[in-house]
Amino acid sequence: MNATAEDKPETIFELKGISKSFDGLQALENIALKTHHGERHAVIGPNGAGKTTLFNVIFGELDPDAGEIYLFNRMLNKRLTRQRVRLGVSRTYQITNLFQELTAEENILLVVNGSAKRALSLFRS
């Protein structure tokens, strides 16, 4: 059976060839990412790896040197931050408040349960 356009998941967000440098220091080089409905991705790396720079480019606080940013197939590159917000791009800043008495796994489960809009079952006996 051949796949049709209806079988392909909708692309929600896409980065194509995003690059950014500062005075000769290459912070981002040819970053590509495509997300579809229902997917979750994480951007991880050590300090100085370019994570904040990437999010500053996505949110419009920095212009990429190269590449394109799409949300629901609309190019965001030349849009102001406030225009991106109206289209659905939002940002939260790192919050390091964890529940110290819980394990790392339990902290992650709280986030997953909370974002799934279902009752927490983590602490039921």
Image: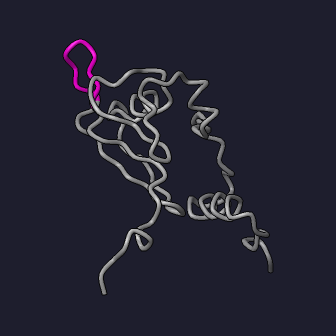
- Residue 36: horizontal and vertical position, in percent? 46, 59
For image coordinates 44% across by 71% down, the residue present is 6
Q: Quadrant of the N terminus?
A: bottom left
- Residue 64: horizontal and vertical position, in percent? 33, 25
Q: Is residue 95 above or below residue 112?
A: above
| Magenta-span inclusion, residue 48 | no
The part of the image, by quadrant, that contains residue 47 is: top left
Please tell me which residue lies in front, 9 or 123.
Answer: 9
Please tell me which residue lies in front, 96 or 90.
Answer: 90
For image coordinates 66% across by 51% down, the residue present is 100
Q: Extreme left residue here?
A: 24
The answer to whether residue 102 is left or right of residue 60 is right
- Residue 115: horizontal and vertical position, in percent? 67, 58
Q: Which residues are magenta?
A: 19-27
| Magenta-span inclusion, residue 24 | yes
Q: Extreme top residue here?
A: 23
Q: Extreme bottom residue here?
A: 1
Q: Main secondary structure of the magenta part?
A: strand
For image coordinates 39% across by 68% down, the residue present is 5
- Residue 76: horizontal and vertical position, in percent? 46, 32
Q: Is residue 4 above or below residue 11?
A: below
The part of the image, by quadrant, that contains residue 81 is: top right
